[in-house]
Amino acid sequence: MGIGAGSWIIIAIVALLIFGPKRLPELGRSVGQTLREFKHAASGASEDREKDKQRQVDDKE
């Protein structure tokens, strides 16, 4: 039960009405940058956990 093509069109029209055609690309770039930063932070956190686990294993030996 995902979002269909008709729903995406309605969302795009509403976004154009609310933000206007000049602000929409800027908004898209901001969202993309935020997602990239979030993914980078999430991958960094998982790498830190792996390093901590390896350090604990090394300490026990």
Image: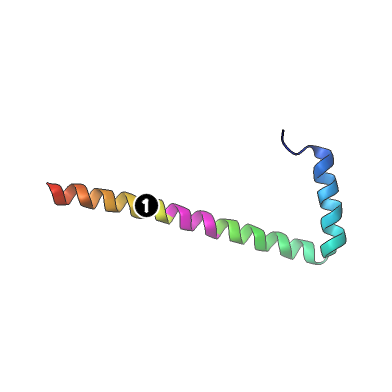
Which residue: 72% across, 63% down? Answer: 27
- Crowding at dot 1, Cα within 10 Å, few <14 / some 14-19 / many 20+, comes out as few
Q: In which quarter of the image is the N terminus?
A: top right
Asked whether 41 falls inside the magenta stretch, the response is yes
Residue 54, position as x, y percentages in the image: 24, 48
Query: Where does label 1 land, which residue?
Result: 47
Of residues 25 and 44, which is closer to you in this image? Answer: 44
Q: Is residue 26 left or right of residue 54?
A: right
- What is the total number of numbered labels drawn onto the structure image? 1
Q: Using the rendered image of the protein, determine whether residue 19 is visible from the camera's viewpoint.
A: yes
Which residue: 34% across, 52% down? Answer: 49
Q: Is residue 22 left or right of residue 2?
A: right
Which residue: 80% across, 44% down? Answer: 8
Residue 55, position as x, y percentages in the image: 22, 52
Q: Is residue 60 left or right of residue 29?
A: left
Residue 36, position as x, y percentages in the image: 56, 57
Could you say which quadrant of the image residue 45 lies in?
bottom left
Q: What residue type is labelled 1?
A: Glu
Of residues 26 and 42, which is closer to you in this image? Answer: 42
Q: What stretch is highlighted in magenta?
A: 37-43
Task: Judge whether 21 appears above or below 2 on screen.
Answer: below
